[in-house]
Amino acid sequence: MFSNLKAISSNKCVVEGKVQPCTIIYSIETGKFVKIFPGEILYNKDPRLSQVSEYVNVSPYVILPGLVDSHVHLNEPGRTEWEGFETGTKAASSGGVTTVIDMPLNAIPPTTTLQNFKVKLDAAENQLWCDVGFWGGLVPGNLKDLKLLIKAGVRGFKGFLMDSGVAEFPAIDKLYIADALKELQDEKTMLMFHAELQTPDNKHTIYTGSDYSNNDLCTVDSPIEKSLGLSTCLSPIQPTSGEISDQVNFTNTLDTNFKQDTITPLGLAQEEDDTLANVDPADYKYFLMSRPDNFETDALNLVLSCLRKQIINYGKSTPVHIVHMASEHALPILARAKNVENLPITAETCFHYLSLASEKIPNGSTFYKCCPPLRTEKNRLGLWKGLRDGVITSVVSDHSPCTPELKNLEKGDFFSAWGGISSVGLGLPLIYTMGTYSLTPAISLPEIVQWCCENTAIQVGLENIKGFIKEGHDADFIVWDECKKQVIRNDNVYFKNKLTAFNGFEVKSCVLKTFVRGQLVFSHETGHSTKPLGKKILEPRTT
């Protein structure tokens, strides 16, 4: 008799927080893990496998939970020349990601109202090669839409504290944050913030100690650095002047014959401040100067002040999350808020911030541009320390693609180029390679699972069905070769536009198979399933 039960085992599985032998029985009918036998590899004739129709032992390969990437821009509908549900989820599943949470901006319309959300859900139909959940957006004027979006299934909300550079997704201020925290204080949801904020005075106070308690101060003194950091022409997350800005904000399709406008963000800044006359827009160090660490520390302090006031006034608050933390100087502030004040706040960083450093960025290589920016090697190691110490709790891709033309590669102008790094599906080999072969002591597989599967599932309120190999959870898992070497190349990635900052990067490990709810969606040998087997995640949060 045909059985809907299958089984898989390996001498190396990450189950119950450790690497151990394990046999896993799952149902292709319910899509759930049915029975887990930690510490055991069952033999074919074991009576506990009597109802199983298919059993395979994949040793020496590793079985891991499917990754949950909680920060991905899929850009559909509206900007499907950048990415789309099909290409984005195929790229995700090729790298062992079984769940992605789609960001509310860079699609048209943005996910800021119930009607806009319905448009996005229609666009996603029959296009998913992994499961997809959705974030809503925080923008001026949509406070009354937030509860409707929660009921419709969004996992939480994201907002910007400074100009996003995307016309349909304007920034919010502290009054909006206070109102949103009050509006949603009794809801099962989360508020997330792109934590960059330009303040009138670039002199700022930061902690420089590695133990998160040193009170040494550091200030910005360089005239050029000060001017770059104070320029309102350069502060938007994406450029708001020039041809590339026009292409992003006023048309849905890219004119392949366009030429970069003579108006540029740096050109406007130079007209206002002759201190910047000799700044080379192709030299990455100047772009980095334009987004100093205090953009992040000041933004974090603003969010924390709103969170404290909410708790003082109402005794409770919905949790808050900082997306793509990139400055080590924000870590002591976050650590104190979490560990001393016990505020409900978490933070993520990204695979690129843990892998790349500013010192190695060649002039004109605008595919490295992102906001917050890639900082120094010292900063990169500081983020690793913050992650291992538990100050940062998760690692995500922040896959933010665009067409090659929007990267302004011909001129190499960092200030004019679209900011964002494409990397969905590349995270597992990147974090494993950097953490295992470059850090002392090396990271462990359970740490990777905690950062990329468990904590991201908790963040999005899916810990009861995603992120863990547990009985009753969705049977999302991968078979992974931790030894196989591969080279990331623009021509072997699955996302739509073949441009990544990791081109030529040699990594250790390779995803051999990806299963979503028990169904094989990707094989390294044969490619993707012929049918889209992913689904939209719309169940209301319970945590």
Image (cartoon, rainbow, N blue to C red):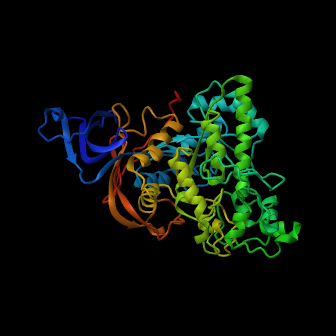
- Quarter of the view holding residue 374: bottom right
Q: Position of residue 236 (x, y in %)?
A: 75, 56
Q: Residue at x 66, y 52 (%)?
A: 329
Q: Residue at x 15, y 33 (%)?
A: 50
The residue nearer to you, when weighing 204 against 142, is 204
- Quarter of the view holding residue 486: bottom left
Seen in the picture, residue 210 relative to 368 is either above or below; the reply is: above
Q: Residue at x 56, y 44 (%)?
A: 391
- Evaluate whether residue 89 shows in this view: yes
Horizontally, is 181 left or right of 475 in the view?
right
Horizontally, is 164 left or right of 468 in the view?
right
Q: Residue at x 68, y 75 (%)?
A: 411
Q: Position of residue 135 (x, y in %)?
A: 59, 40
Q: Position of residue 495 (x, y in %)?
A: 49, 59
Q: Residue furthest left?
A: 45
Seen in the picture, residue 534 relative to 240 is either above or below; the reply is: above
The residue nearer to you, when weighing 286 against 7, is 286
The residue nearer to you, when weighing 91 against 14, is 14
Q: Position of residue 466 (x, y in %)?
A: 43, 38
The residue nearer to you, when weighing 67 against 434, is 434
- Quarter of the view holding residue 471: top left
How many numbered discs? 0
Image quarter where the N terminus lies is: top left
- Evaluate whether residue 126 shows in this view: no
